[in-house]
Amino acid sequence: QVQLVESGGGLVQAGDSLRLSCAASGNIFSIESMAWYRQVSGNQRELVARVTDKGIDYADSAKGRFTISRDNAKKSVYLQMNSLEPEDTAVYYCYMILQTDPRPYKFQYWGQGTQVTVSS
């Protein structure tokens, strides 16, 4: 069984920084894609940033302020968030697409979410 565990959320003021971390554990053969999504209550979950072997993508709202990075050896992904704004308040979810063995079957996993609250 695979689990994604996030950490690093919290309550900060506008202009502050936070670093989110997500570590995967369990039966993992390889990780194709790692990403961060966020969701405001009542809204759809939206992509914040994604990193794959082909490159990195950011939502327009994250460009220039957020940086996604990965550590393959630790099976972890990080999101450095700078210049936070009240509009960044949301639950942030880690997401991975991975293989659990050498067979070409890929599975999606979500973390439990971590709350980020930015006060004005």
Image: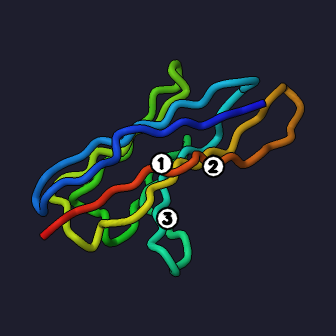
Residue type (three-letter) at the residue carrying disc 2: Trp
Residue matched to label 2: 110
Q: How many neighbours does mark 2 have within 10 angstroms: few (below 14), some (14-19), or many (20 or more)?
A: some
Helix, strand or loop for disc 1: strand
Q: Residue at x 58, y 49 (%)?
A: 95
Q: Where is residue 74 in the image (x, y as percent from the top left)?
A: 51, 21
Q: Which of marks 3 and 1 is in front?
A: 3
Q: Position of residue 78 (x, y in %)?
A: 39, 39
The residue identified by callout 3 is: 47
**Distance of label 2 from label 1 (alpha carbons):** 21 Å
User: Which label was assigned to residue 67?
Assistant: none
Q: Could you tell whether 58 is left or right of 82 in the image?
A: right
Q: Which amino acid does label 3 sit on?
A: Leu
- Above or below: residue 103 compared with residue 13: above
Pointer 1 local density, CA inside 10 Å: few below 14, some 14–19, many at least 20: few
43 and 50: which is toward the camera:
43
Classify 107 as above or below 115: above
Residue pictured at 48% horizontal, 68% vertical:
39
Q: Is mark 2 on a helix, strand or loop?
A: strand
Please state which of residues 71 and 42 is positioned toward the viewer in this rendering: 42
- Total labels: the figure holds 3
- Quadrant (top left, top right, bottom left, bottom right) of the N terminus: top right
Where on the picture, by quarter, is residue 32? top right
Question: Is residue 98 shown left or right of residue 57?
Answer: right
